[in-house]
Every structure is written in C-alpha cells, then in structure tokens.
Image: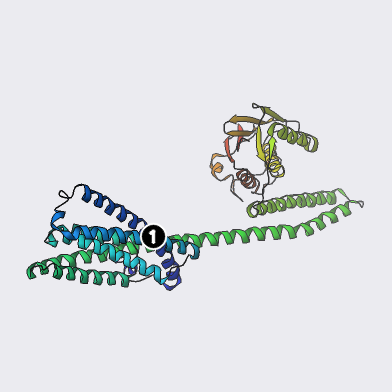
Amino acid sequence: MNKAQLKSLSHKYRADWRNYYTGQNLAAVHIAALVFLLLNGVIRVLYEVFPLSLTRAENFPEFNLTNWVFLASSLIYYLLSYVLIDNYKRNKKATAIMSLFIFSFALYLICCGMFSSFIATADPKNGLILYLIALTTVSILWVFEYYETILLIVAAELLFTSLLIWGQTDPTEIVYNQIVSFVLLGGFYLISRYFFSYKANYYLQVIEIKEKNIEIERGSDFKSQLLGTVAHDLRNPIAAVETLAMMMEMDEIDEDLQDNLNMIKASCEQARLIIDELLESARNQNTDEFTTVRTDLNQFMQGIIEKWENQKGSKTIELVSRVLPAYAELNHEKFQRVMDNLIGNALKFSRERSKIEIVLLKNSPHIIIEVIDHGIGIPKEKLPVIFEAFTKAGRPGLKGEQSTGLGLSIVKQIVEKHNGTIEVESEEGKGSVFRIFLPES
C-alpha cells in the first residue's frame, strides 16, 4: 500500500494540496447536492402521482417525512456550497469551515443512504444497496485525510447501530447487520484511501511538471541573457581588430601581409555575423512585442529581390506569383530577415548562375511562399534537425562560407511568431524547397 494512503503529503506540499482538493471537494458537493435535490424532487412527484405503487411507501409514514427532509437539506447544502465556492475562488485558500461543511455533507449523504435502506425494507441487510451506493459515492468523489476518513467510519457505524436499535431489530439480526456494515465500511476505507493516493500522486506529478517548466524557463531566460550580453560585449574588441587591420593597410605592405590582413578582416566579418545571429536569437526568444501590418506579398517579395540585385549583385532570383493579390500580416523587419536567410542559403548552396525562385501560392486559408533552388540539396539524415539551434546540419557553402547553425532556427522562430509554419523538401543533387505557410489576411 502506498504511504500516501495512510498519511498526508509531505509538509512542503501539504498546504497547497489541501487548498487544491478543498476546491475540488466543494465543486463535488455543489454538483452532488443539485443531483440529490433533483432526484428527491422526482421521487416527490412520483409519490404524489402514484402514491400506492411506489415501492410499498404507504407502509412507511417515514418515507414522506424523509423525502421532505432530503429536499430541504439538499437545497440548503446546494446554496451553501455556492457561497463557499465563491469565497474559495476569491481567496484560493481552504478554511476550517469549508472542511467541516464538506465532512458534514459526506456524512449526510451516507446517512441518507443508510436511512433509505432501513425504510425500504424491514430487514436492513436485505436492502443495504442504497447504503453501499452512498459509501461508494463518497469514497470516490471526495478527498479526505486519513483521520477524517476514520471519523466518518466511526460516525457512520454509530448511526447505523442507533438505527438498528430504533428499528427494534432482533438481536441476531443486529449481529448480522453489524457484520455487513463492518464489511461495507472496511471497503469504504480502502476505496477512499486508494483514491486519495491516486489523486495525491496525480497532484504531485502536476506540481513536478510545473516546477520543471519554471526551471526550464529560467534556464532559457538565463541562456538568452548570457548570449545577448556576450555577443554585445564581443562587438567592441572585434571592431578594434578590424580597425587596426584597416589602418595597417594604409601603409605600404607586401603581398603576404596583405593576405594575412584579408584573413583577419574575413574572420572579423564572420564573427560579426555570428554575433548578429546570437543577438537575433536572444531577441526572438525574449520579446513578446511583435507588430504586424497587412502587406501585399507580391510587392514585398519584389522589393526583396531588387535589394539583392542591387546590393549583392545577384541576377538569378525570380518571383513567380500565382495569386493576385496576396495579403498577409507581416512584421517587415523580421520577415525581411527570414527571406534574406533563405535566399542567402539558396545562393550559398547553388552553383554560379543557378536560378533561385520565390513562388507565391494560395491554399485557403493560407498563403504559401516557396523558396526553390537547384543546388546541392540537403542530406536526408540532416532534414529532421535542420531548424534546431546550433544544429549539426550546418555545412560550409560551395565557396567555403561558414555556417553559424542559427540561421534556420531564427527563421522558424520568426515564422511561428507570424502564426505560420515552415517545412522543407530536399533531394541531394537536385535542390531544396523551403515552404512557408502564413494565414491569409
């Protein structure tokens, strides 16, 4: 038997656990009281309409009085549970009054089942089904500490004994009925402790998951802050090295020194690229601010192509639009980076004069942007991890361009902030297709 069946939770979680299950218990009381109220209302209607045919009720005057008592008391419990639930929602804290209220309702429900069994037949042991149903219902629906469960058992047994005496049952029958009651109450204890254990373990798992999530979020925030700080602080020394190399070029230098200076400047440029991508990755993970505007994708993509042609000298990028007009909500600065990264990768892994196509499609409710190249393609084993940060899928370009392992990770982050998705299809030796799905605006 799990220790949680005999004891409460550890002190660290005890207060929060009690607050949690008290809220659950109050909600169960609220629903059970309503169901019991409706059930007794139906019985009252049947009793009034068919008084002689309702399970020998005419032989038991107690039935009529009991039904009225059940109606009134279940209504009172329903109303009180509504008040206590409202108080619980405002304070999120269990009180002694709430615990006493829940305990009293559980005992009340057991007594109802017990008394109904007595008035249903002269011999209780032949009609304890209602008593059994009440005990089972209480053990499943409500969570009680072990001492509360024992108190319920003691109170129920005392009441059962009192009803046997009140019913003037034969001494032999009293013994038989008591044995049956002990069996039912023993089963009630085991079921109650089992469900306590089950619900407590579930609660602990939920708490553990929440704590792990908090740790992960803190670790992610720390990593992003560290990346941002380190990347920002590295800019100055790199800029100083690059400036020094440029100053040295102003003097008369031999060919070997010039080659070394070119290597220094190329390394500085590569370092700046890595720093920019580290900062971009940190910003995308940390910021919640993301402003978009409704944008004509045909004009936006044409503008990107013109910038590449003017700044990069690339004449091999072509826009193929199969939807006019094509509108989507875009953050221009961020999505410019998405397209620059995808176009840059396409050129990096394509041969000279190989055509790059940007294709616009529509598959309602999405606008689809495809960046197609006819380059060397991506190995099949690298495709599943290509959008992960610092992935091993990164490779040097055809001209030896180095990869930081962050570009496609940043692309995925930005696309998802646009409520979109990105996927890739590729075959080695034939090229790649990066496909972005954006909600149509």
Q: Is residue 180 left or right of residue 74?
A: left
Number of other residues with Cα within 10 Å of mark 1, as a class: few under 14, some 14 to 19, many 20 or more: some
Quadrant of res 399? top right
Query: Could you tell whether 48 is left or right of 98 in the image?
Result: left
Residue at 67% from the left image edge and 40% from the top image edge: 330
Whole-percent x, y for residue 57 in the image: 16, 54
Q: Could you say where residue 327 lies in the image, as x and y percent from the top left?
A: 66, 34
> Horizontal placement of 392 versus 210: left or right?
right
According to the picture, the residue beneath numbered tag 1 turns out to be 79
* SS assignment at label 1: helix
- Residue at the outermost front position: 48
Can I make out residue 154 in this image?
yes
Which amino acid is tagged 1?
Answer: Leu
Residue at image position (62%, 59%) is 221
Q: Is residue 257 above or below residue 91?
A: above
Snapshot colouring: rainbow
